Amino acid sequence: MFLPVSLTLLSIVIPARDEAGCIASTIQHLHLELSLKQLPHQIVVVDDGSTDAIWPILTNLSVSLPELKPLQNTGLYGFGRAIIFGNDASDARGELPDRCRCAPCYRPTWGRTGGV
């Protein structure tokens, strides 16, 4: 028999480089979906050497979204390095750490019937 286990915290680490055009909506949609499912979470976004305005966007968004933990990778850049940096440098303490790539072509309707 399967007994449901209570999740205390889901940590999601998102490496992002030059994604100023989509990072806010990506974080907001992710936070909304997790909140609707009543999943306790933190979203750790690692600015991985961006040359655009992603850092001010992240810091401004974190004021109104306490679940967001923005970090700046100050070492070597790269997807895997940003994941490690996010796990090591933050309080990514969730039981089920996960990662995702911030895609500039993200569409909130992907995966839903009838829309692209």
Image: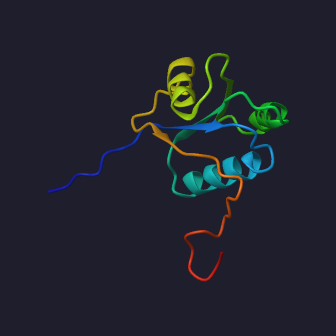
Residue 70 found in image quarter:
top right
Q: Residue at x 62, y 25 (%)?
A: 77
Q: Residue at x 65, y 52 (%)?
A: 103
List the single residue furthest toward the bottom.
Answer: 114
List the single residue furthest toward the left.
Answer: 1
Residue 20 found in image quarter:
top right
Q: How many marks?
A: 0
Please indicate whether residue 86 sits to the left or right of residue 73 in the image: left
Please indicate whether residue 22 sits to the left or right of residue 102 in the image: right
Q: Residue 109 in the image: x percent, y percent? A: 65, 70
Q: Residue 16 in the image: x percent, y percent? A: 66, 38
Q: Residue 106 in the image: x percent, y percent? A: 67, 59
Residue 7 or residue 53, whichever sits in front: 53
Residue 89 or residue 103, whichever sits in front: 103
Q: Residue at x 57, y 58 (%)?
A: 36
Q: State whether residue 103 is above or below residue 49.
A: below
Residue 2 or residue 57, whichever sits in front: 57
Residue 1 or residue 15, whichever sits in front: 15
Please indicate whether residue 98 sits to the left or right of residue 22 in the image: left
Q: Residue at x 50, y 48 (%)?
A: 39
| Placement of the C terminus among the 4 image quadrants | bottom right
Q: Residue 28 in the image: x percent, y percent? A: 70, 50
Q: State whether residue 66 is above or below residue 89.
A: below
| Placement of the N terminus among the 4 image quadrants | bottom left
Q: State whether residue 34 is above or below residue 83.
A: below
